Amino acid sequence: MSNALQSPPHRAVVEHLVRQTVYSRLGKSLPRSAASPNPLVVNVSARHCHVTQDAVDALFGKGHQLQVHKWLYQEGQFAAKETLTLVGPRSRVISNLRILGPCRSLNQVELAYTDGIALGFDLPLRSSGDIKGTLGGMLMGPAGFFELEQGIIRALRHVHMHPADAEYFGVKPGDMMKLKIGGECGLILEKILCRVDPAFKLEVHIDTDEGNACNLQPDTPCELLK
Amino acid sequence: MSNALQSPPHRAVVEHLVRQTVYSRLGKSLPRSAASPNPLVVNVSARHCHVTQDAVDALFGKGHQLQVHKWLYQEGQFAAKETLTLVGPRSRVISNLRILGPCRSLNQVELAYTDGIALGFDLPLRSSGDIKGTLGGMLMGPAGFFELEQGIIRALRHVHMHPADAEYFGVKPGDMMKLKIGGECGLILEKILCRVDPAFKLEVHIDTDEGNACNLQPDTPCELLK
């Protein structure tokens, strides 16, 4: 089942094409941001978790398949209809924690520091998948519990890039970039980790604290800088 | 009653003096940050409100005087022991909203965008005191209610400066500066409003969203830039 069948092109993709066409018709040279192979999409990731099929079995019943609530910008990724309850290491609770599908080979909970304060402990800042030595908790679903031995983190800010984007920006996997966000309470986020894969579309993921610090809206100008 | 009697010098003040002394003893020239007349203090302001004595009378009883819970860095300013409950324009509630004293000539509630999302409306971004046309709500205290006709805002990021600081940085009241915050998830906050007064000590106020976006800790390096 293809993502392309599920959702129309992202607004940013359409705008990027229109911009390129307009500059071309006017016979003007493209500004750098419009000359990039792909449009820049910046999305705020609210707290969420990734789970294994084993966890889904325990939480929602043996053989349960995650249902698509909403397709995300990255091909094949979706917010699931399923949510769960997290009991943190100090027994405090976050309810309605959204699962992002499809299932992965490891369980990981990605929170903002504001959530960490609510849970009462210092979240470690980690790159996705690098969860060794982090704290865990208990996941609760309608069909049962699943013990999360480790994996509660604040994910490093990152940008998903196609190799063509990485070449355009002159970066390689693991490099750090900056994201300049405009508007009345604009800011520049430093240390945006580059993640490069032929399956990726150009997209920066920031968390709710970062999005709210600058009041990121759909029409807020953003610029990715080396 | 002087603030100086209430609290020891701020850690930043002591560090600034020590730094200047060390450079001087080593016979080295001061780096720019150490050469400033005053140390830079950056504090996170959690959501709070400023109230008039009329509001205090209605909320806590006629003639009630705000009690000091904790002295703040600015001379004579304090977090009061008193908190109140805010019922927002969509009837949603924020409890334990801290009052900052002493009383002022206007009532104003300063929230973060995260709080605005919880209350279900778009907070206007305003300079403190500029509340005309903003939404209000109902304030509730142990002795009664007080109708806030307007004044729920997200305050502009700002820096309090003594005229000597403004001269050192080459700015004037109303100018905008930047604050570079270091660390593993550092960022640069743009549009920090300069507020200059002989009574002010050099201090940047950011909100909880901004503080959590960069995980600001007491030892996080900060730099104020023109």
Image: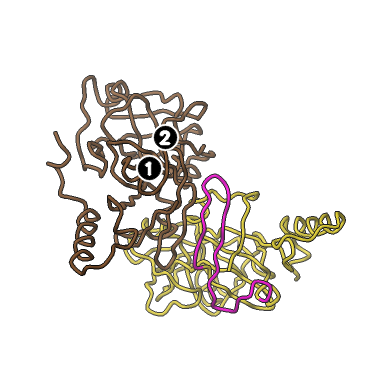
Chain colours: A yellow, B brown
State the image quarter where residue A69 is shown. bottom right
Quarter containing the C terminus of chain A: bottom right
The percent coordinates of residue B24 (x first, y second) are 21, 64
Label 1 – label 2 distance at C-alpha: 13 Å
Q: Which residue is mark 1?
A: B47
Q: Nearer the viewer, residue B212 or A29?
A: A29
**Disc nearer the start of the sequence (1/2):** 1
Quadrant assignment, res A126: bottom left
Q: Is residue A186 magenta?
A: yes
Q: What is the three-letter code of the residue carrying label 1?
A: Arg
Question: Which residues are drawn in magenta?
Answer: A167-191
- B190 in relation to B52, above or below: below
Q: Quadrant of residue A6?
A: bottom right
| Mark 2, secondary structure of its residue | loop
Location of residue B90 with respect to B113 vertically, above or below: above
Which of the numbered marks, if any, corresponds to residue A64?
A: none
